[in-house]
Amino acid sequence: MPLPNNLLSSMEPQGCTPIIHVHLHSVCGSSGTIRPAWYKERVYHVNKVPSLEHNGKVIGESLDLIKYVDINFEGPSLQPNDPAKKEFAEELITYSDTFNKIVFTSFKGETVKEAGPAFDHLENALHKFNDGPFFLGHEFSLVDIAYIAFVEKFQAFLSGVWNYDITAGRPKLTKWIEEVNKIDAYKSTKTDPKVIVELYSAIFLAKH
């Protein structure tokens, strides 16, 4: 369930105004990831959101898109030069799918017990480099962008439904969220927590 605002977070630091084909119901609608009938035929045959059209080419998948934006648009790179940080960045980006799956799956089970270890993993990862508050230390990077949009939504949903504070006992995660929220490019993409709780409740807690 990739969400567009992590893509948008990567685009504003790059100073570009791209054409993005995103149906907003994938973020804040009441019926899940709804796309209009013309989307698959006219925009992106894979029928996933978000997707990006650039130079006549349409690509999708959030992680692929933020890498594409970083490489193809002007602005400071969001990928590290340091070999150790570059290796760790790839490791964390690869793990992001596992992280999301663990938390999403927990919504149907013993939520707090099952989701907790995933956030512990992030807490431990944030201890790797102590020269700053982000995953790669002082450098805000693609890793932070890959995680923050999901963490933001998980935080709102877990707090709103289960009264579970993902930052309790996790000082590094707390600081990371605080620092990312100071970044204007990210703040402009945030979703109202109430909307997140309503949407996720409709998707994950609805009785069939």
Image (cartoon, rainbow, N blue to C red):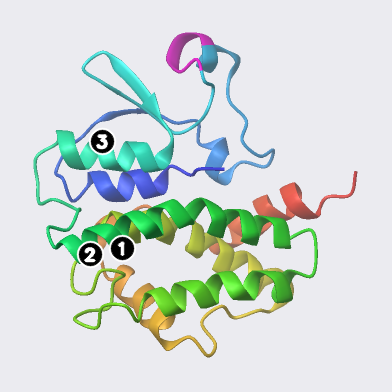
- Magenta stretch: includes residue 132: no
Q: Amino acid at mark 3?
A: Tyr
- Inter-mark Cα distance, 3 to 2: 19 Å
Residue 23 spot, x, y in % from top left: 50, 30
Whether pointer 2 and pointer 1 mark residues with C-beta atoms closer than 8 Å, the reply is yes
Q: Let me know if residue 145 appears in the view.
A: no
Residue underneath mark 3: 68
| Secondary structure, magenta segment, majority class | helix
Residue 50 spot, x, y in % from top left: 44, 33
- Closer to the chain start, of discs 1 and 3, is 3
Which callout, 3 or 2, points to the residue nearer the camera?
Answer: 2
The answer to whether 21 appears left or right of 32 in the picture is left
Residue underneath mark 1: 88
Residue 171 image-quadrant placement: bottom left
Whether pointer 3 and pointer 2 mark residues with C-beta atoms closer than 8 Å, the reply is no
- Closer to the chain start, of discs 3 and 2, is 3
Mark 3, secondary structure of its residue:
helix
Mark 1, secondary structure of its residue:
helix
Q: Amino acid at mark 2?
A: Lys
Range of magenta residues: 41-45
- Inter-mark Cα distance, 1 to 3: 19 Å
- Magenta stretch: includes residue 44: yes
Mark 3 surroundings within 10 Å by alpha-carbon count, few (fewer than 14), some (14 through 19), many (20 or more): some
Which numbered disc covers residue 85?
Answer: 2
When the figure is inspected, residue 184 is found, relative to residue 165, above or below; the finding is above
Quadrant (top left/top right/bottom left/bottom right) for the C terminus: top right
Q: Amino acid at mark 1?
A: Phe
The answer to whether 102 appears left or right of 9 in the picture is right
Q: Let me know if residue 89 appears in the view.
A: yes
Mark 2, secondary structure of its residue:
helix
